[in-house]
Image (cartoon, grey):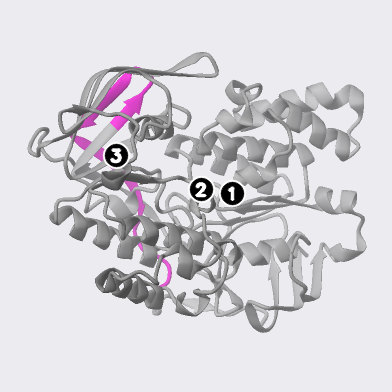
Amino acid sequence: MGVELKGIVYPSFIKPFDFTFQSQAFTLLVGKSGSGKSTLFQVIAQLSALPYSGQVLIDGIELSKLSITERVQTVGILFQNPNHQFTMESLFEELIFTLENIGHPVQEIDSKIAEVVQQCRCKAILHRPIHHLSGGEKQKAALAVLFAMNPRVYLLDEPFASIDRKSRIEILEILKELASNGKTVILCDHDLTDYEAYIDHMVELRDGQLREVFQIPTSEMTQVASKEVASSPELFHMDRTTCELDNRPLFSIADFTFYQGISCILGDNGVGKSTLFRSILQFQKYKGRITWRGTVLKKKKSLYRDLTGVVQEAEKQFIRVSLREELQLDGSDSERNQRILQALRYFELEKELDKSPYQLSGGQQKILQLLTILTSKASVILLDEPFAGLDDRACHYFCQWIVEDSQKGRSFLMISHRLDPLVSIVDYWVEMTATGLKHLKEVSISRPIKSLGIEDEREVRLNG
């Protein structure tokens, strides 16, 4: 019977709807930023902060009638922000805590942890402090906790936002195997790359209604070339730059130059990309020298007038109580205010100006974060996973903005595992490994052939 939604009414869903997610299948849930996908997952998992009416049934059993312990063993959820998932210091401690709380036999906990670690390929991060893990490593850790709970239904909200393609394919294979073994898997994503070989169904949430999409997108490999190295002036230079984390070497960069323009840094999860950004911004201790336009970088207030960045988790960057205040719309810069208001209208956020940023969806928070940074006076912007939670329309909007700013002399360094939006705008592709950075002449990118959201797609509304 699967996951049945009967007469669901929720503040962000205008009218009641019924829908059934198929049992023992792998379903991809899609929809534009702010359409209510995360909210729907919270309703299914009985974690909604706001009241709703209607019934959620799992294989015919109403979820609200179950005890909390029975519930978490019936439906497990991986949040969009993995930091919301953890209670303990390390993944090992988190797994013990989780298994004890669901009543797993004490004598079998060690063997269960070993099974989960092997299944999720996460041995390397098992004992490291969770707050030292990269965004992608945290996603893997959160997935391991979900696997330890062994629910009948898996809900995964943007699980690949910070994950490299190799790990993405590994996890897709694991999820496909789960569905083949009788689990129900529902995954929410904006990036439609690589799904055709793994999913059984694709469902769209649009205008508060669910409908199955019968044209599952296919992907193709595209070769993308970089500009010739040194065809632009020097931006940053790394000279014998090394960094340690948890008393272990993280990266070592003997000699490397970033050039003005738009650069994108590629590399496996945990290799140190975000830490490199923190080093450039002088928030992370390192050895060696980083020079900017020929001057050694030093932490001082004036530096941040010219140099700023976007962190992976948008909510960490908010400091004011409303969107209006966060965007500083009461300022005297009328041209800036007009640009922001135009963007807010485009994303249908104009009516949310007096809301707290924390009341927005993950994708809307990312839009707010990008608007705040892109309308700053900084001449160099570092963007760490700027497209997490964004639909194709929003990605295209901000890519156009980045290109326009680049043409006016602003430079961008980006870390992104979602490469499709960047194909036509990046000047320099850079690979990062533990042994350093290197410019790539060309990159192979997997991208969906057809994007969702085009009105002429063949789709049929099911069950209301």
Q: Which mark is residue 303?
A: 3
Residue plotted at (66% across, 55% down): 25
Going from N to C along the chain, the mark reached first, 1 or 3, is 1
Write down the region rendered in magenta. Answer: 431-453
Query: Which mark is nearer the camera, 2 or 3?
Result: 3
Identify the residue position indicated by label 2 in the image: 313
Viewport quadrant of the N terminus: bottom right
Task: Count neighbours of disc 2 (C-alpha within 10 A) and say few if under 14, some if 14 to 19, many if 20 or more.
Answer: many
Residue plotted at (35% across, 69% down): 331
Q: Does residue 375 appear to the left or right of 362 in the view shown?
A: left
Q: Does residue 410 appear to the left or right of 215 in the view shown?
A: left
Identify the residue position indicated by label 1 in the image: 81
Callout 1: SS: loop
Tell whether position 450 is magenta. yes
Q: Which mark is residue 23?
A: none
What separation in Å lies between label 1 and label 3 (alpha carbons)?
A: 30 Å
